[in-house]
Amino acid sequence: MLKGIYCADLFRYQKLPTREVSIGSLMMGGKYPIRIQSMTTTDTMNTPATVEQSIRMIEAGCELVRITAPSINEARNLENIKYELKKRGYNTPLVADIHFTPNAAELSARIVEKVRVNPGNYADKKKFENIEYTDAGYSEELERIRERFLPLIKICKEYGTAMRIGCNHGSLSDRIMSRYGDTPLGMVESAMEFLRICRDENYHNIVLSMKASNPQVMIHAYRLLVKQMLEEFGPVDNPENKSEIPVCYPLHLGVTEAGDGEDGRIKSAVGIGTLLEDGLGDTIRVSLTEEPEYELPVARMLVSRYDNREAIQQEIPEMYSPEKYYNAFEYDRRVSAGVINTGGKNVPRIIMDLSHSEKITPSSLFACGYNYSVPLDKWNLSDQACDFIYAGDKQVDFDIPGTLGIIHPYSVWCSVKDRQQTYPLMTIKDWIEKDHHPELNFVQCSMNDLINEIFVSSITENPTAVLILSTDNPHGMAEQRRFFLEMRLNEINCPVIIHRKYEKINEEALKLYAATDAGALLIDGLGDGIFIQADKISPAVINRISFGILQATRTRISKTEYISCPSCGRTLFDLQETTARIRSRTDHLKGVKIGIMGCIVNGPGEMADADYGYVGTGPGRITLYKGKEVVKRNIPEEEAVEALIDLIREHGDWVEKPMTVST
């Protein structure tokens, strides 16, 4: 029995039961493991290059290789690619990626094991036009789509070919946009229209995806999709048969246009990891603006956390009617009281751990975003300056920046003479029995502390408490979520800092795990800050990751955001090199969102979420966007980056890079 609003269980890890789908010899969904996949970036007509790249992907762990087929010629060449791979001993299933061209899809379905179609552009169009439909007119449009889509379904049934109905936030059709808007609900309905046609034809070899460059939109869309399937097809998909078939189809998870490097990994982990935590997802693709073989280790690291999660998790109390206290389908920040600079309407705060330092000096704060200028005798703050330092038993005997607070364990804090900007970290016992700081007290707690009535009563009555919420549960995100929902139920509104401590972990894993664990809560409006501790990881790295998580969840913007696609055979310029050049010129523009797209398939749509867009529209030619409006067309590629800078200047968003101050 499913207990979750959109998943098997909100408070216990259990993979959502889904239909089993066959993709050649590869099985997906049901009891099968979460599959990992990627996509080639080569020209599909270049058979040797595509084969070599596919082999590198497969040897890196890719279980499904996706290849773009933008026209009938590329679709036809899939046969040569498949033949060469088999000749060299590789039988990994291939997926044809289709946009705009049903004839290419119909040919591909006769050649490869799976086709991906995008409902937004398979039988529809996008010109950013608002169209008024009557119900009858809308029904006529659905019938037109059915006629266009039926030939592909029949071919897939005949050849045993699987299909992914892959909806992209950036390419919703004008028809869907006109009726549902640029929303997760619009994405869900776009996919459901195609899925209903497939079901009418008794074709079920289907995988679904709801991709967006904004993790918040992406997460809400997948949750709504599952909810819609459960309501529309459930509770049993074949009531005449005694054997129950799950009503949900397998889910392909991904954050599209995530970008490159650390930002791309963190953004992907926030989106994909949040859904994996709730048991959603049967296959994942991490979309990075890098070589595709680099995506696979990231995907494997995300997925491997759930190999044994069900067996090792600790029990979490269930909750009566959690949907009353948990809005899973839109961003809804928990209301909390403001305590100095924490909670209330303040952005989430970051606590950094310097307690393991041999000694805390002004130079120690450099890793945390503070730079002391000796000649000027003043502190320079970066956009990623943390808010509090946990100093442990180390004394801070110098003047600190006015924006920084120091935290000591209660026993150490009691011995500090100058308590200005210095606050205690208290145990529950300290909080109940000892004297408090008059303005701000951090109190370490966990899920079980909410059964302590004296503690609950005292934090409700005393407006100076900020809770540091910790967990050692292997399924810690769900336990911490349960804590927040209990607070809502009991109308406890003190601020809460999400605390996670990681042991024996490397930097790459920390990016993904912390982004999943803290990001999943922040994306749902739960948490007033984060406190990440990790053995043997430098404070500078943890500080950068912490700000990256807040940026990816869009709860605190501290740097430029790049919406950059991962490249494919449609790409019209070197995405990696161009992204690096644009980043080097613009990475100081805090809060500005820049989209860098290799082609026009999703480009204009994803530009709607960006302030500026750089899109390939022909070999060596770039079109620039302001929002979703074209402002300059067909700029030679060698002039395009400078033209983008000029465009940002024209609209008043340009500032010069700050000079580095020597210390």
Image (tube, rainbow, N blue to C red):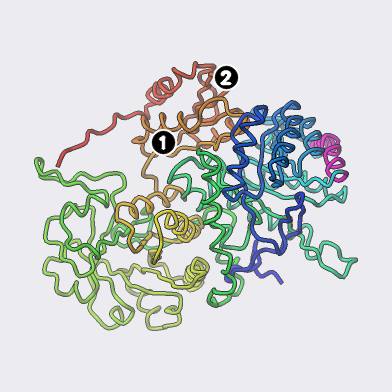
Magenta-colored stretch includes residue 273:
no
* Relative vertical location of residue 137 with respect to residue 618 in this rendering, above or below: below
Above or below, 447 against 559 in this view is below
Of the residues shown, which amino acid type is indicated by label 2?
Pro
Q: Position of residue 38 (x, y in %)?
A: 61, 44
**Residue 515 percent location from the top left of the image:** 46, 55
Asked if residue 388 lies left or right of residue 222, the reply is left
Q: Position of residue 21 (x, y in %)?
A: 76, 54
Q: Nearer the viewer, residue 12 or 663?
A: 663
Helix, strand or loop: magenta stretch: helix
Q: Which residues are magenta?
A: 136-158
In the displayed structure, does residue 219 sit left or right of residue 152? left
Q: Along the line of sight, which residue is nearer the eye, 363 or 144?
A: 363
Q: Which residue is mark 2?
A: 619
> Badge 1 is on which residue?
592
For the N terminus, the quadrant is bottom right
State which quarter of the image contains the C terminus. top left
Q: Secondary structure at mark 2?
A: loop
Q: CA distance from mark 1 to mark 2?
A: 27 Å
Residue depicted at 53% across the width and 21% down the height: 623
Question: Residue at image x 53%, y 48%?
Answer: 215
In this view, 144 is above or below 62: above
- Residue 212, position as x, y percentages in the image: 58, 43
Q: What amino acid is found at the position of numbered circle 1 in the picture?
A: Val
